[in-house]
Image (cartoon, helix red, strand yellow):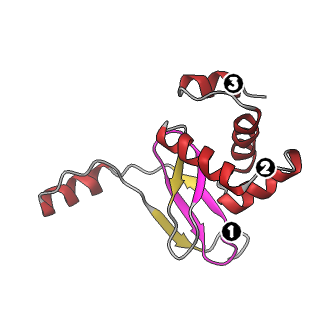
Amino acid sequence: MNDYTTILREHNLKATPQRLEMTNALFMNGHVTIERLYELMLKKFSSISLATIYKNINLMLEASFIEEVKLPNAKSVYELTKETHSHLLCSKCDKVQDIVLNLTDVTRRASNAANFNISKTDLVLSGLCENCS
């Protein structure tokens, strides 16, 4: 099991029982909607509110402990912050998976073509996963 207490504290977040469980749920499930996270949290904290989930999600986002993945035509999912990567989204089963791509050339060309200083890339590629193909 990971030392979530230390990781939370490194991001200046208190290691409350709810945040520890949220971290575990994100680690175990990868990409999770707020609604799914709420369902998972209710199993351990039967009186937890959706407002508490939102409050903690927002604090974790502000601390760059987690990241929001905005998906086309779908609800955002959340994941623990990790190395820079893109996402694959199955348009049939909605599975989201990470893929590491070198986008240096694409961002450089886009920046030069539009005279635009790109600070972040969020790439989601849609299609069919192996199971749905």
Q: Which secondary structure, mark 3?
A: helix
Q: Amino acid at mark 2?
A: Ile
Q: Is residue 66 visible?
A: no
Q: Which residue is mark 1?
A: 130
Q: Which secondary structure, mark 1?
A: loop
Query: Looking at the image, which is closer to me, 133 or 8?
Result: 8
Q: Nearer the viewer, mark 1 or mark 2?
A: 2
Label 1 to label 3: alpha-carbon separation: 36 Å
Query: Looking at the image, which is closer to me, 60 or 120?
Result: 60
Give the quadrant of the N terminus. top right
Label 3 to label 2: alpha-carbon separation: 20 Å
Q: Which mark is residue 5?
A: 3
Q: Which secondary structure, mark 2?
A: loop
N-terminal of the pair, mark 3 or mark 2, is: 3
> Which residue is at 73% across, 60% downward?
36
Q: Which residue is mark 2?
A: 48
> Which residue is at 62% across, 52% downward?
54
